[in-house]
């Protein structure tokens, strides 16, 4: 198990954790509300079956998030271990792609 990205997978759902409708949203820009802000990221309610996380690796130094803020990001994938959708801001390169470019991924 791990990250589920339908673009890179032959699977259609992840053990029933993600609906087909949610799978169809992967790769598109979604909007939600910040419901918690931590040093390690922002938890966002997208109105889906699971909350989402905007990882600190995608947050720029000048970014400031507060509970109640509207957040628009790409819905990248679903992390089965964390049981959260993973968000990526527009204009940011996915972390996996950054690692691949540096020859650091398997």
Image (cartoon, rainbow, N blue to C red):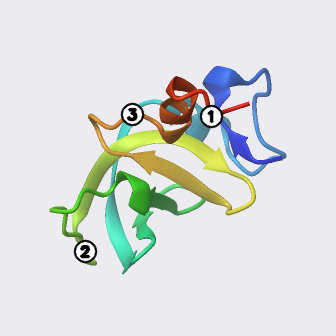
Q: Where does residue 39 sit, x and y in percent of width and height? A: 40, 77
> Which residue appears at 76% of the width and 48% of the height?
2
Pick whichever, 18 or 63, lies toward us. Answer: 63
Which tag is nearer the camera, tag 1 or tag 3?
1
Q: Where does residue 105 sit, x and y in percent of width and height? A: 66, 33
Asked if marks 2 and 3 touch (Cβ < 8 Å), the reply is no
> Which residue appears at 48% of the width and 60% of the height?
53
Pick whichever, 83 or 93, lies toward us. Answer: 93
Element type at marker 3? loop
**Label number found at residue 68:** 2
Q: Where does residue 69 sit, x and y in percent of width and height? A: 22, 68
Q: To which residue does mark 3 refer?
A: 93
The CA span between labels 1 and 3 is: 15 Å
Q: Where does residue 106 sit, x and y in percent of width and height? A: 74, 30
Whether residue 55 is visible to the viewer of this picture, yes or no, is: no
Which tag is nearer the camera, tag 2 or tag 3?
3
Element type at marker 2? loop
Nearer the N terminus, badge 2 or badge 3?
2
Nearer the N terminus, badge 2 or badge 1?
2
Asked if marks 2 and 1 touch (Cβ < 8 Å), the reply is no
The CA span between labels 2 and 3 is: 26 Å
Quarter of the figure with residue 73? top left
Quarter of the figure with residue 70? bottom left
The CA span between labels 2 and 1 is: 37 Å
Measured along the vertical axis of the image, is residue 76 above or below residue 97? below
Query: Is 52 on the left or on the right of 59, as rendered?
Result: right
**Label number found at residue 104:** 1
> Which residue appears at 60% of the width and 27% of the height?
103
Whether residue 77 is visible to the viewer of this picture, yes or no, is: yes
Residue most toward the front?
A: 103
The crowd level at tag 1 (other Cα within 10 Å; few <14, some 14-19, many 20+) is: few
């Amino acid at each position: 198990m791990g990250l589920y990205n339908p673009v890179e997978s032959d699977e259609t759902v992840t053990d029933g954790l993600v609906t087909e409708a949610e799978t169809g949203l992967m790769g598109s820009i979604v909007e939600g509300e910040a419901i918690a802000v931590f040093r390690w990221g922002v938890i966002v309610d997208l109105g889906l079956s699971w909350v989402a996380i905007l990882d600190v690796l995608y947050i720029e130094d000048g970014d400031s998030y507060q509970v109640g803020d509207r957040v628009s990001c790409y819905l990248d994938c679903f992390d089965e271990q964390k049981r959260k959708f993973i968000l990526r801001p527009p204009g940011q390169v996915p972390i996996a792609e950054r690692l691949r470019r540096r020859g650091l991924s398997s």
